[in-house]
Amino acid sequence: MSATEGEYLHDLRETLRRFVDKEMPRDVVAQWDRENRFPREVFRKLADLGVLGLTVPEEHGGLGRDIVATMAVIEELSKRSLAVAIPYINAACYAGMNIVECGTPEQKASILPRVVSGDMIFAYGWTEPDVGADLASVRTRAQRVGGTITVNGAKRFCTGAEESDYLYTLVRTGPESERHRNLTLLLIPSRHPGVRIERIHALGLHGFSTTDVTFDNVEVGLDAIVGGEQAWNGAWPMIVGPGLDVEKLEVAAMALGVGAAALADAWSYAGERRQFGKTISEYQSIRHKLADMKTQLHAARLVLYHAAGLAQRRLPCSGETSMAKLLATEACKAIALECQTIHGAYGYVKEFDVERCVRDAIGLPIIGGSSAIQRNNIYKWINRS
Ligand SMILES: Cc1cc2nc3c(=O)[nH]c(=O)nc-3n(C[C@H](O)[C@H](O)[C@H](O)COP(=O)(O)OP(=O)(O)OC[C@H]3O[C@@H](n4cnc5c(N)ncnc54)[C@H](O)[C@@H]3O)c2cc1C
């Protein structure tokens, strides 16, 4: 990284920190979590900072593709609340980056400027009741007759569907036997006739709820095919392409933010809480835990930003991104639980933010490809190289 790039990232982080302090105070963020409410008014203000344009080319109103800076934004927002970080990902990465990589010129012209202005959010409809890691087995069907595509099926854990403009939906468009060659991505308007959305009550990741989505004879035109008519049955390369690498990094960046937040709180608490006549940070067992956690986070940060640099330069990085996702999310989960322990009984009550960090941290190794799937990827990658 050059000195100018380093300065740019430093300034970007400072801007984000000021934004978080002003727009996302702790008591307000706790309320979003309690009410499971999407703070759209705060999300929109991200457009004023320009950060929604970090995945969008200048010709469409963005700042140009900058994966490293995008990860820094996700990390800084996640230090305070995933209720803004997750919609940022669903807009900048899911809508912005995916359409830049896979969209038709018309889709780019209509969607990308609205990503930059904070008026376009996608929800990802990939997982189904019977389909988790094995995405090539999706059963939601789309049939094409003339210029009309009819969709029937069900998606599960579709985060942000209630608040989204489009459901970025993976559908089967041919016989199941041809698994990888009969999948298509569709842009289905979230409030279209035949679309039903129902909230799922999850342990954490509140603020941008996850949902069940049902498609009952939903009709869209051919312009809903991501990548245009020639991309009918052509979704698989789009799914396993650069988008997947960046998706792993997005979750890793959230994990860094949540882990750093939990650790900062535990560090302060340990310096203030007195037992047996001294602060608990004076006990070696506590200060060693703090030092170990700081070290784990530092290692995860280096692996994440190394992989983000590779992704930025469009170099092969499926192994490095899997390692970043595995390391950061597992470290975050372990750190959040350890920080809760350092808080004693106070880590178990809602008045302390570490309680939310634990609930959020537990979800991160699951989403965006579980830790087991990342280990499988890393093993295959090593065997290939
Ligand atoms: C809060 C939340 C939000 C989510 N948001 C979205 C979203 O917006 N869009 C979306 O499409 N999905 C979303 N998901 C779904 C998420 O991506 C899936 O949960 C994830 O892909 C795992 O699928 P599954 O839960 O069905 O687990 P399964 O795939 O059924 O796996 C169950 C267990 O088996 C293990 N396992 C599975 N296959 C293997 C294997 N080959 N080798 C070793 N172990 C294996 C897994 O690691 C896991 O421990 C969300 C989930 C949650 C909890």
Image (spheres, rainbow, N blue to C red):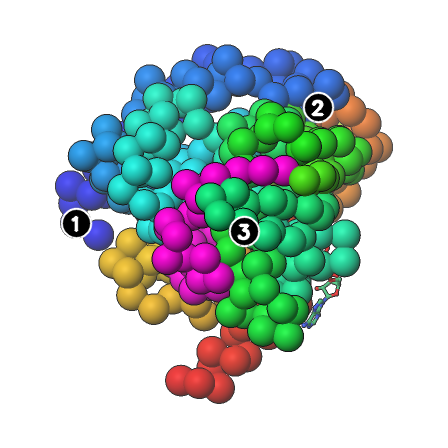
Q: Amino acid at mark 2?
A: Asn
Q: Is residue 157 above or below residue 261?
A: below
The Cα atoms of the two marked residues, 1 and 3, are separated by: 51 Å
Q: Dot 2, how many residues are within 10 Å of its Cα: few (below 14), some (14-19), or many (20+)?
A: some
**Residue on which disc 3 sits:** 144
* Vertical relation: 309 (above or below) 61: below
Pick the quarter of the image with the C terminus.
bottom left
**Residue 214 place in picture, x, y as percent:** 72, 39
**Quadrant of the picture in which ligand 1 is shown:** bottom right
Q: Return the disc, 1 or 3, that comes first in the chain's sequence.
A: 1
Whole-percent x and y of residue 176? 65, 69
Instruction: Name the residue that disc number 1 marks.
Output: 2
What is the CA distance from the residue labelled 1 to the residue labelled 2? 41 Å
Q: Is residue 184 left or right of residue 363?
A: left
Q: Secondary structure at mark 1?
A: loop
Task: Give neighbour class at mark 3: few <14, some 14-19, many 20+ (Cα, 10 Å).
Answer: some
First to last magenta residue range: 218-247
Q: Which label sits in the foreground, 1 or 3?
A: 3
Q: Where does label 2 land, which residue?
A: 36
The image quadrant of residue 57 is top left
Residue 231 seen in render: yes
